[in-house]
Structure formats: structure tokens, C-alpha cells
Image: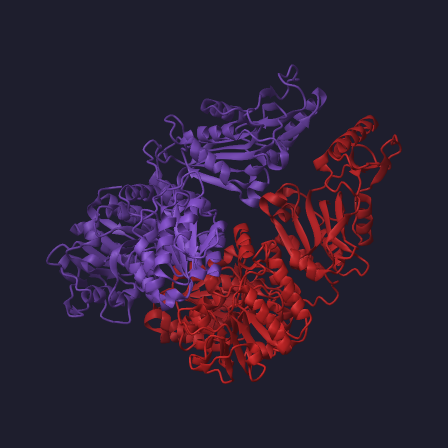
Chain colours: A purple, B red
Amino acid sequence: MRDNGFIQPLLSPRSVAIVGASDDATKTSSRPLRYLLQAGFEGPVFPINPRRAEINGARAWPSLAALPSVPDHAFILTPTEQALEAAEECARLGIPVATILATGFSEDRDLGPARVEKIRALCASSKLRILGPSSLGAINLHHRTILTANAAFAEPDLPIGGTFVASHSGSMLGGLISRGKARGVGFAGLVSVGNEIDLSLGEICAATLDDPNVTSYMLFLESLRHADDLRRFAIGAAERGKPVAAYKLGRSKVAAELAMSHTGALAGEDDVADAFLSDCGIARVESFETLLEIFPLLKRVAPGATAGRKPRVGVLTTTGGGAAMIVDGLAGRDIEVVTPSAETFTRIQATGVPVQHERIVDLTLAGTRYEIMKASLQAMLEAPEFDMVVAVTGSSARFQPDLAVRPVIDCATSGKPLASFLVPDAPDALRMLAEASVPNFRTPEACVDAIAAAYKRRQPVSFAGVRPPCGRASRHLDELEAYALLANLGIRHAPSVAVAMAQQPTDLPFPFPVAVKALSASIPHKTNVGGVALNVSDATALRGAIDRIAESVSRNCPDVRLDRVLVQPMTAGLGEVLLGYRRDPDAGPIVLLAAGGIYTEIYRDRSIRLAPVDPATARDMISELNISKIFQGYRNRPPGDLEALARTIVALSQLATEEACSVVDAEINPLIIRKAGEGVVAIDALVQLEDKGENNHGAVEGAGER
Amino acid sequence: MRDNGFIQPLLSPRSVAIVGASDDATKTSSRPLRYLLQAGFEGPVFPINPRRAEINGARAWPSLAALPSVPDHAFILTPTEQALEAAEECARLGIPVATILATGFSEDRDLGPARVEKIRALCASSKLRILGPSSLGAINLHHRTILTANAAFAEPDLPIGGTFVASHSGSMLGGLISRGKARGVGFAGLVSVGNEIDLSLGEICAATLDDPNVTSYMLFLESLRHADDLRRFAIGAAERGKPVAAYKLGRSKVAAELAMSHTGALAGEDDVADAFLSDCGIARVESFETLLEIFPLLKRVAPGATAGRKPRVGVLTTTGGGAAMIVDGLAGRDIEVVTPSAETFTRIQATGVPVQHERIVDLTLAGTRYEIMKASLQAMLEAPEFDMVVAVTGSSARFQPDLAVRPVIDCATSGKPLASFLVPDAPDALRMLAEASVPNFRTPEACVDAIAAAYKRRQPVSFAGVRPPCGRASRHLDELEAYALLANLGIRHAPSVAVAMAQQPTDLPFPFPVAVKALSASIPHKTNVGGVALNVSDATALRGAIDRIAESVSRNCPDVRLDRVLVQPMTAGLGEVLLGYRRDPDAGPIVLLAAGGIYTEIYRDRSIRLAPVDPATARDMISELNISKIFQGYRNRPPGDLEALARTIVALSQLATEEACSVVDAEINPLIIRKAGEGVVAIDALVQLEDKGENNHGAVEGAGER
């Protein structure tokens, strides 16, 4: 990342050139000039079009070189090859920022790579910073800079406010701005980041962190790219108390494929991205509309507010059915709806309302009365058993917003978060709530989604100690070497003896039955090549097993010379898990805990965090796994040693910080969970080291080839 | 179920009495009279209030008995005890229908049961039919009958149309009517069914099936009650092509608890209800707003339209990001987004638009042009590879609905379903689409939810052959008796030999190792009492195992005299499943297939259908289970005998129709799946028969006590 100097010419340019501006109003290339003039942009605007003398009343210029002064920002609307030429001219002329609209770079499998390389070389060899390519532009509403080809910005009265939008999809800016307008959200700026070949989404957002006009961030993501930049930005945003919400595509494989064809990004696993966003303190919403409704709530709930336990919500309602939708939804997202304590209930009863002491405080019988609703809400907001309170209002919100919604507004200054869901269609009441910055939701689903997303994000931690990205994996360790590496981290493995193929093993330091495995760094997946024998019961059987493994391996891997096998005692336990560490190409170092055996894939029962993790986080990971139930006294089974498991997770995650370590991937599968007090034991391990060759620390090249 | 005579006095009364009508406009009891008069109800209205001469300009009467004529419908607004008295008077006077507002019946654990009994007795001994108690009333917009205490009906210009609403929650009627109005949905009638002590939701809906004013049904359910009535109605609706959509609470345990406190219903398992609704051809939506948006789509997609395979959807868009939200969502709901065939793509290209041959037909580069969009849509609607087409429109839907939305409307007469999702806030375009009855969605989530719900419902089957509900389970069979019952159905079990405790078993008809299990109808859960020994390797070990079982059982179950054990060979296979049948108290006979062992509970990996099922349905059930992957050649394993499994599911499900059978519950756990061609084998079975005592066929009592 270079300095933030690009942000002023990008978002607050004093002058703008529009390369390829058209005077044909039906063409996309006519829009930026029109919108810029319409918005009342105050500096000079230079349309570049050698075939026109004037466009939309502005003098047109034949080339960038012909301009009377060097513009701050050039928006290049010409087709791919000409756009490249224009960018080169920008660099020559000392223009600090250019935005490229054309496609044909990252998304073009054939001609793209060479073009991408040209852009990179251009930026490396000059002071030019480039937004895109495939960017629909950059908009700064506070600076009257509507520099975009997106038709949505023909909108009169664009809603100005504090939200800054960065999006992989340029067309989505339109949907966000019109929906924001309808829901009382105002925008500071919007950027379509395109391919992010030079300027990344995270870098752009980070450069706006100290802009007082920007108070929150809305991200529309198709994939995780330049994750280090994104993480650095997210940490900065958390430090400044500026909330970040994201909608991310790619839950399905099909969507990942789309992202590829759309922006050339190769999407990684969605649940890695999910863990990344949570660990960055970014609220990932599940439904699109939540993105527009979540900010007032995010401003009241800090990341990690209920770390290590479930959030506890109190619900007050004037309509049973409406509240039940919220309760049902929250329970489905692992949030507790808590019954008021006896003390709280007594305070609510003191309002004189006939109310039952139940999980939901149902004021239906009280009718809609300001004083009762306000006093009840206040009692709940002051009650220690709730992290936040949701008020669900029925038809009165439509007919008598002053009675039904005013008490919510008047209570919202409490230090405890309060959210409002309105059951009827009640636009006036929603407007009143929005104007008062009270979290308010049009649907029960968005209300639930926002609460879940707000509490799911964790306090982001600095990654100062984390080693920079390394080269690609090349070399495997053999199982014994892998155990030695784990042992250095303090991770236990099963007793293991290497036996030469020809040797007749006697004097094993453990009793039969044993497991026998091909021992070679060249055979990482032993089972697939017949390289494993289990439950070998005596010396004769052991000899036979070794011979069979030799035969199998030589048949399946004719190029591998197998010298040794590994012999281990058969190790029993309460069950098994998979514990993994890897330097994810998108998210960076992660640690992963999963159900072992075939269930890893069949049920995708897993928990992921950015590495390294502390013991509390390791315990959270364990509790997130469904399979963990069988280690927690399930059906009268003895409890498993989950503390040892937590220690082992912490230990493996330290690979992220080890100075001398070049581990790209390490997987213990299975890790046997024994009874409480008896520890956990690795009985297989697979470790890959990074390529020590010329691509070492080749982050940029690596990223380009992903 | 009695005859449908109640429906005219319930929904189209010629005259109405309002018992306990108030002239205090702040009181709930003032509303029904006010709304009725305001709506222009044409018949006589009799407010009953002994302390008033006139209310709202209508002459008040001291009692029902004092009325000059017998009204069709009495709405009773008085508190619980007086309401009971009023209902008794209705019965005496020959009033055909009474609606009771008061609570204190099913939801009151102490005083409720006796009151419920009184209502039942009253209805049984007279011609009176009762709606509620705890009903907010019944509304017929075509008949100007706004007979409700729900404040939402103060709404001017109530939206009249073809949708009939039946709801367990009275307050939700308000939310539905205002949101319906905002989204162009019109209502024929709305009923708050309350406790359903007499008139059930299904019974009421069924009675409106031939009303030409009613074209579709919207249900808001808190639980499944009177499921037979509901099923009968659903079959009738499907026969008439009148679609039914339902939002059902109770996905979480907490919500089930709420339903209990709210309406006194004990909610069963939500996934049983889910299977019930699908098998009834009812579209269950996940999000509230979908309920308002789904009908135009349901009218175009018949239940079971893509039975036995995934629905195939084509997506056309003017905005990549917006379409990706739809694709991502559909993939998450198991719906395929299909790439156009080469032929279809050629037809689209013929429009002259620069479009890539990809999964999504992306017209972004074409701009928004009526002819191109229409021709492309038409090509897709005529293409055999799609079951339906979704058109996703960007900002142009907001600014140029005539260009962007008109082609969708003009294509919607195609025989193939076409749905529209608009990315921006575009109320005018939504209105145009709604007026043209084109399925249109405000959010990507509702679009996806509606499509998934429409295709998930199955063609409802008649349950003519299904035996009526039976009494509660009382008696278990022992394992040998259970096997005999299964054998009669054609279900294979492991070879089994009963051995007397004292006997020294010799000459077993199968080799060691064996399993030994306590054999007694009094010990249904053998494992819990130490009644099982596995992998018993020889005769000596067998003797020891029998003695240990004897000791364990006599210690754990001192009252049981254990005479015999069951000995079976250890049976290996590729894996195991649980196969169950039960007469669910809510849904009726169901068949359930689930992952076996501890995974049944930990992952809730299961598939449920109303019994009996045919082979195609059994195959669908298998394919719905995640664990089935391991029987389908997963990781080079041999494939399992899934055809034998399907036959076994069909066989067990026949318990629903067996004339002589009184099975309440039958569970084969585990059922061992062997290699293809080798069949499936039950190695344990648990069967419960119904109580043959006085409660036999005591459906009504049973329901009351659930």
C-alpha cells in the first residue's frame, strides 16, 4: 500500500478530464459529463473528444496532452485498447488518478493477463493510481463529484449523508442509492472498485477513515480480494467507531463462478470469508435490505459486545404474532430471547398494565398508550438481563405513530440498544424512527438479520505479529517430520516408530494392534494409494501389512521409492476432529476445526478463525461445532478433554506468527479426543511448506494468478 | 366435520348482534359496530348493551333474547365468563354462529380446560357453531362485513380482491391488510380463528372453496391443529387450482413455547409440519413479505411441477450484481440456475445484443431496449431447458419502467412462469407488474423464497385409504414380535434366535461374533439398562454376556422379569439409517428417514413425508438426506442398495393403510444398508401399538390433552 495521496484526486478532484465523452445522450459515455455538470461540480471539467468542439456546453479537447492544465482525475470511457493508451498518457502527463470503465482485463481469460500486467507496470513506474478497470466511477456527494457512468445517478436530489459505499458491482450502486433514499439513508460517497488491479477496496476505504463526512461503511462484495488492505481498513474503522456492514455474494458455488466471469476474481470458500469478516469486526448481513437498515443498530452495538456468550434480547410488543416472528428468527440465529427477571417484571407491572410474566412482554391488553409503553420499555432498558431490547408494534404504528412509535423514540437515548420492528406497512412511523436514528426495520427478517450480524462481529485484532504472505506451497513433510513440527508447538501425537521396509520389526515400544502407514513426503495421501493398514494384530500380520503396502505403493506410485513405514499403536478415544491451519490466499492465516472423518464434508460442520487465536476464541470455536456435543457428556458418554483441544487449537494457530516457520498448510486429521484429563492426540498429520524459490514473498504475482 | 352451513352466517350474515358493544371509542369493544357501520353493512345490526339505548346511532338492545329477530351471527365481546353465558344464550335462541373474543380458554392452564369442555358440549348439543374463542373476528370485504375488533380495520379503502386469509394470530390480520394494500394485493375475507375449539381453520377455508370471490388462500399458522381438516381443504384447493400459501411460526423451540402461551396450542416438530404442508401442496414461505408477493407465481406453478428433480431456472438481467443475488439465493435453496442451450443462445444473439454465453443472460451492454429484452425473454420462455425464467432489472426500472418492465409484462402471457425482481426502489414499476399479475418481487430474498416455496410443494394426494386417528400408544412389542410385523410388510431383519436365560446356547444357526440383547416388551430401550452386548466372540463369551445382561437388567429394572435374550450375528454394511413410521398427533401418519446413530440428533439429517408413500417419493426422501452420499459411491466406496431402501420405506409406510393394524409408532434403528443388490437389513426394531381401551378412536379427547 502506498500513501493516501490518491484520495483527494479520486474523490475530491479540483478538475476532471473525461476521456471519450460523448454528446449522444443515449450512450453510456455521455453520462459522466452530464451528471457532473448537473450536480454543479465546481472545478473545470475537460471532455476529451477529438471529433467535437463542445459537449453539453463544455469546450471539448482533442487530447489529454492538449489540456491547459493537468487535471486531478481522468475518467477514461474509451474501449479497452484505447483506454490503456489513455492511461499511459495520464502517467506521462502526471495526472494522479485515472478511472477506467472498460472491461477486458481480469475477466478476459485470453487477452486479459497481458493487459493487467501493463496496468501494473504503469502504476509501478509512475505516480498514477488507477481505479478499476471495469469501474463505473467514484462519487462524492459532499463535493458535488458525480463522476460515474451509472444511470442511477440521473436521480434528482441524491440523498447526502454519512455512509460511504464501496462495491465490486458498479451497477449495484444504483440499487443502493434509490433504496437508501427510500429508507432515509444518506451517502457520503460511492465507489465502484472494479477489478482492483491497482487501488483496492480496502485501500480506498482506509483513505477515507479520517474524513469527517464519512461515518459508516457499506460494502457490496463479490469475493475477498486484497484482504490485508480490507483488514487494515476494518481495524481503523473499529478504532474510530465507524461501523462497517457488508453484503457478500458467493454462498453458493454457482455465485462463485459468476464472480469469476463478472470481475475475474476467483472466489475462495465462503465460510473462510465469513470468518474473515467477523474477525475484522465487519457485520455481514444475509439479506440485501438489511444493508440499508443496519447502521443505526451498528452504531449502538460495539464489535464483540457479547464475546464468548449468546446475545440476550428482550422483546416487548403490542402484537403477539408479530413478536413471535422476531423470537422465532432470533432463536434460529442463536440469539437468546430472555424472559424478564422478577424485578423487571415488577417494574413493568407497576405501570398498571395487565401483563403476564412470560418471555415476551405483551402489552396487547393495555392498548396503545404512550406512558405504559414508555415506562415498560424503560424498565427493560435498565434491566441487566438484556443486552438489547426489541419493540414490536402493531397496527397502531400505522394509524397513531405518535402514540405507538414516539415512546420508542423517547427511550432510544438509553445506553442500551433498542430496535423497532413495525408489523403493518407504516412508512410515516418508519420515517419518524429513521429521523431520530432509532434502529428500525420494515420486515421481521431484516430485524433479525441485523441483530445477528451486529453481534456476530468480533473485536478486530491487530495482525502486527502475523508474517507477510508467502509463496505457494511446494514441499510436503513426511509424517514424522510433521509430528516433530507439531511437537515444537506443544502438540501431542501418537507414539510412532519408523521401520525400514526390509527390516523385521521386533521390540515395538507399544503393544499390538498397530497401524502401519507408508512414510514418505512424496505420498501425502497414503490411503488413496493403499498405503495404510489398520488393526494389525501381531508380528506376522505386521510383516504382511508392510509387504502389501510396498506392493500397493509401487503399483500406484511407480516413481516413488518407499523406504520406510510408520508404525503406531491403535489409539482409541471418544471421537475425532480435524484441526487445520493454512495461509488462505484470500483471508491470510486461518485455523479451522471440523468434525472428523466423512462428516467433515457431508455436514460441513466447522468453525474458522483468523490465526493466531487465544484460548477464549478456541473455546468459542469448539462450542460452534455441532459434533462437540458428543464430547460434552452427550447421552451419558464421558466428557472429552476440550480444554486440551482448546490448547491445541491455540498452539497450531501460532504457525501464523512463528518467525522461522514457512508452513503454508498443516492438517491434523484425525485428532483423537480422549476423556477429560487425558488430552488429545494427533494420529495423522500433513504439513506443506512454502516454495523457497524465486516466488518467495511474491504476493503480487501470487495474487494475480489466483 | 359437520356441514358447511355455518359459512353464510359466519362470513355473509344477513344480520349481526354485537354482545357487549361499547360507545366509548377508546375501547376495543367499540370497534366492531363502528367498522361494520362504516363499511356500509346492509343488514340489521343489533348492539347488545343493557346500559345504553343507542350506540353510534344504532338502537341498543338489553339482551339477545330481546331482539326482534334471530340474528345470523353474534359477535361476543364480553369477558370470559359472561361470554360463555352469551354463547349459551345463542344456542338457546337458535343463532347459528357466534364469535368469541375473550381469552381464558385453551391458553389458561387452570380454568381453561373446564371452559373448553363447556364450549364443546354446547356445540355438540345445539346447532351453534363457534369461531374462537380468542378470535378477533371475521371479515368479508365483498359483503361489507367488517366484523372485527382489530384496530387495523379502521383503514379507509380496504383492498378488495381474491385472497382469503385465515390466521391463528388475530393481530396479524392488520399487518397483512396494510402490507397487502401497499403491494397491490386484494382480500376477499379474513378470519382470526383463535383457539379453534369448534370451527377449525381448515374447515372454514374448505367452506369457501366454491366461493367465486375467493381465488387464493393465505394462512398465518402458529402450529398445526386439526390437520385432517387442513389437509381436506388443501386437497380441495388444489383440485380447484386455488393456490394456498402459509407462513408458519415455530421453527425454534422458543416459538413453539410462545404458541402454547399465546393460543394454547402445543406445537409439534416443525419439520413434521413442514413435510405436512408440502405434501398438502401448500407453499410454505420462509419470510413474511413473501406471503404478500407469492400468489401470481403460485398461479403459474402447479404443485409438484418438477416432482423428482430440481427446478431449472433461467436468469436474464440488465445488472450483473442484482442477478448474482438471485442466483446465489436459488443455489442455496437447491434450485438449479441453468445455462441457456446453444440453440437458445443463438436465438438471443439473433436480437443483435452483445451477450456472452454464460449461466446468466446479461444484457447490460445492450442498455435497456424494449425489443432486445422482449426477444431475449421470449427465446428463454420458449426454451425447453427452463422451468421458469427470472428477469432482473436494474436502475432503468426506476427511471424508465416503460422500457425496462413493459417487455416483462408483454412476455408474461407465455405458458411458462416468468418472475421479475427489481434492484432499485421502483414502486411504479412494481405497481405496473402487479396490475398485470406478473410475479414481482421487491427483494432478492422474497423472489428466491417464493420460487423455492412454489416448487417445494407437492401434488397433494387423497388420504382416503388412511385409517382414522387412533388412541394413544400403550403397548410395546418385543423385538421378535416387531420383526414378525415387519416381515409381514416384506421388511428383512437379521437372523434372530431367542435363548432362554438359563439355557446354554449351542448350535446357533450363524457363526460368531454375535450380538446379544435383552428380549422383552417391557424393555424398549435396552441399551440404557445394560441390556446389549456386541461383538460376542464365542460360546464362553456368550454365556458371560447373557449373565451380565441378566444382572444389569435386574439391577436397573427390578420390576421386569427377563426370560430371554435375542442372539443375532453381527451384521456389517456400508452404513446405517433410521427408518420410522408414526401416527403424528398433529400431522397424522408419517414416515421418516434419518441418518443413523448419534448423527440423527446432532445433524437432524432427515426427510419426512405423510404416509403412505410411493417408490418415487421414497427415492426423493433418500436423495434429501445428506448421509445418502456415502451410499452413492462416495470416495470410492461401493454403492449401497438404495433401491432396497426405497422398497423398505414404501413397505413401512403401508402401516398407514393396513386395516387390521394398530401401530402408533415403529422405528427400525439401525437399518443396515448393504452393497447394491444385497438389500437392507433391520437389526433393531421398536413397535408401539395403540391403546385398545376406552380411549380408542378418542381423537377429540386426545387432541384436547396434547
- Is A420 on the left or on the right of B413, as rendered? left
- Which residue, as the protein is rendered here, is positioned at the far top? A507
When the figure is inspected, residue B178 is found, relative to residue A417, above or below; the finding is: below
When the figure is inspected, residue A117 is found, relative to residue B536, above or below; the finding is: below
Q: Position of residue A507 (x, y in %)?
A: 65, 14
- Which residue, as the protein is rendered here, is positioned at the far left? A68
When the figure is inspected, residue B108 is found, relative to residue A653, above or below; the finding is: below
Q: Position of residue A217 (x, y in %)?
A: 30, 51
| The quarter of the displayed image where residue B698 is located | bottom right
Q: Nearer the viewer, residue A688 or B550?
A: B550
Image label count: 0
Location of the N terminus of chain A by quadrant is top left
Q: Position of residue A359 (x, y in %)?
A: 48, 50
Which residue is depicted at the point 46% across and 40% down?
A608
Location of the C terminus of chain A by quadrant is top left
- Is B569 on the left or on the right of A242, as rendered? right
Q: Is residue A248 visible?
A: no
- Which residue, as the protein is rendered here, is positioned at the far front? B51
| The quarter of the displayed image where residue A156 is located | bottom left
Q: Position of residue A577 (x, y in %)?
A: 55, 35
